[in-house]
Structure formats: structure tokens, C-alpha cells
């Protein structure tokens, strides 16, 4: 294992709605359509349908598939989608060990002393406090991630957002000791929703050779 090479940052995903021309199934009398995200069919508990010439999609499933968070206000009957803008920078400090030290170099690979820092900027959040949970996960050959089995995680981290136009910054230090073999790894930033669940809002994939 010589170095880590970042090869993709997943920030935006593309949604495709596919309508079969023959023998569409029905849901409550409406034609069912399939939803593809990045050419992969999305599994839905309630199907997408065509009503009055419009395609209607299950909001929560589609939003979460593109790393968005859906909230529901029952009093006003309002559904909202939160899609933060996330930037991840890997760097080392001059002393090579602390997250508070002065940065010496922005790097795309492990530092010489087997530690690296992730500096994370999150914008687009309304004013308030938000709880984050970050982890490193092993990906399979198809870049699928098992979010129930992290290799390394950090305690929950609270950030204070001053508004959607003011990004909040924080930094975490990671140790290479928990990664023992070459392969593809995913650094995932999760945000807690108002129901107490953590949802991925950014994924940074790395290949360790």
C-alpha cells in the first residue's frame, strides 16, 4: 500500500425516470414508472406514477438517494428537502498530528506518519445547530457501501450554522491503522435529521493501492 488516490467526489447525482412503452403496471389505477439514478434502478416502497400527464415521485426515497434530507411539518403540511453543499479537503499539519495545528500542505494521500486530516466545509444550512457523524467504510468492486459496518468513526460532532451563505468548517484526524488492505474506501459525512436518523450528505471515495 503506497498511497491513497482520491478518484471521485460524489456531490451531485442525476435522476432519470424511465417509462416503459408496453404493459405498464398500475398503482391505484395510475401507470407505474421506474426511477433510475446513475443508471441504477431505485427501489421504492411506493411506486412512482403518472397522473394527469405528470410524473409523481416518492419524495423521501428520491431525495435520500441523492444525499438529501426530507423533513415533514405536520402542522403546516409542508415537506422540505435539505441538500447541503459539502467540500472535503485532506491535509496535514506542520506537526503531523493535531487537527488544530497550522496546515502545511493539502495532500491527496496518507501522510508519512500514517495520519491524515479531513477539513470539511458545509454550506447551505439554515441558521442553527446540526449534528454530524463521519466514518470510513469499505466499498465493494461496484462502489457499494455498507453503512452499517464502518471501519473507523468519530464521535458525533455539532456545528453551528450562521445561515445558508456562511459555510461551517470543522476538522477531524484519522489514523491509517484501521485500514489493513488495498481497496476502495469511502469517507462519509452524515447529518442527523429531525427524527434522530443519520443520513449521508457527502461521500468521498478513495482507492488505496
Image: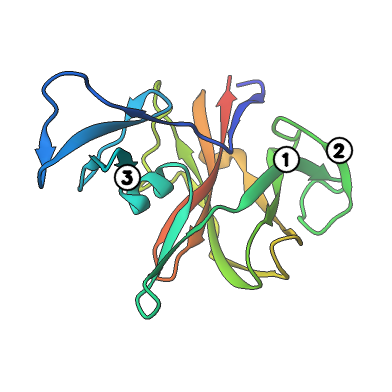
With respect to residue 140, does 154 lie above or below? Answer: below
Q: Residue at x 73, y 42 (%)?
A: 89
Q: Residue 175, how many percent across, how many down?
A: 62, 45
For residue 43, the mark is none
Q: Residue 2, how many percent across, how many down?
A: 66, 20
Is residue 76 in sight in this rendering?
yes
Q: Residues within 10 Å of mark 2 (few under 14, many from 20)?
A: few
CB under 8 Å between discs 1 and 2:
no
The reply, left or right, for residue 107 in relation to residue 24 is right
Which residue lies under the disc numbered 2?
105
Quadrant occupied by the C terminus: top right
Per the image, label 2 sits on a secondary structure element best described as: strand
Per the image, label 1 sits on a secondary structure element best described as: strand
Nearer the camera: disc 3 or disc 2: 3
Which residue lies under the disc numbered 3?
57
For residue 90, the mark is 1
Question: Mark 1 or mark 2: which comes first in sequence?
Answer: 1
**Residue nearest the observer in this picture, 49 or 125:** 49
Using the rendered view, name the quadrant where residue 18 is placed: top left
Amino acid at each position: 500500500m503506497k498511497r491513497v488516490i482520491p478518484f471521485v467526489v460524489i456531490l451531485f447525482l442525476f435522476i432519470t425516470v424511465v417509462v416503459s412503452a408496453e404493459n405498464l403496471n398500475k398503482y391505484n389505477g395510475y401507470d407505474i414508472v421506474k426511477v433510475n439514478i446513475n443508471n441504477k434502478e431505485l427501489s421504492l416502497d411506493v411506486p412512482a406514477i403518472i397522473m394527469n400527464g405528470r410524473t409523481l415521485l416518492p419524495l423521501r426515497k428520491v431525495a435520500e438517494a441523492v444525499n438529501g434530507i426530507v423533513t415533514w411539518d405536520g402542522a403546516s403540511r409542508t415537506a422540505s428537502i435539505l441538500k447541503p453543499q459539502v467540500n472535503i479537503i485532506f491535509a496535514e499539519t506542520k506537526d503531523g498530528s493535531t487537527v488544530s495545528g497550522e496546515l502545511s500542505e493539502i495532500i491527496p494521500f496518507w501522510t508519512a506518519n500514517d495520519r491524515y486530516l479531513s477539513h470539511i466545509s458545509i454550506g447551505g444550512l439554515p441558521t442553527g445547530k446540526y449534528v454530524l457523524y463521519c466514518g470510513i467504510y469499505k466499498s465493494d468492486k461496484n462502489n457499494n457501501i455498507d453503512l452499517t459496518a464502518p471501519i473507523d468513526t468519530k464521535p458525533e460532532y455539532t456545528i453551528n450554522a450562521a445561515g445558508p451563505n456562511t459555510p461551517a468548517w470543522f476538522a477531524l484526524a484519522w489514523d491509517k491503522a484501521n485500514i489493513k488492505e488495498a481497496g476502495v474506501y469511502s469517507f462519509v459525512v452524515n447529518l442527523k435529521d429531525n427524527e434522530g436518523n443519520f443520513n449521508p450528505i457527502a461521500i468521498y471515495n478513495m482507492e488505496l493501492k
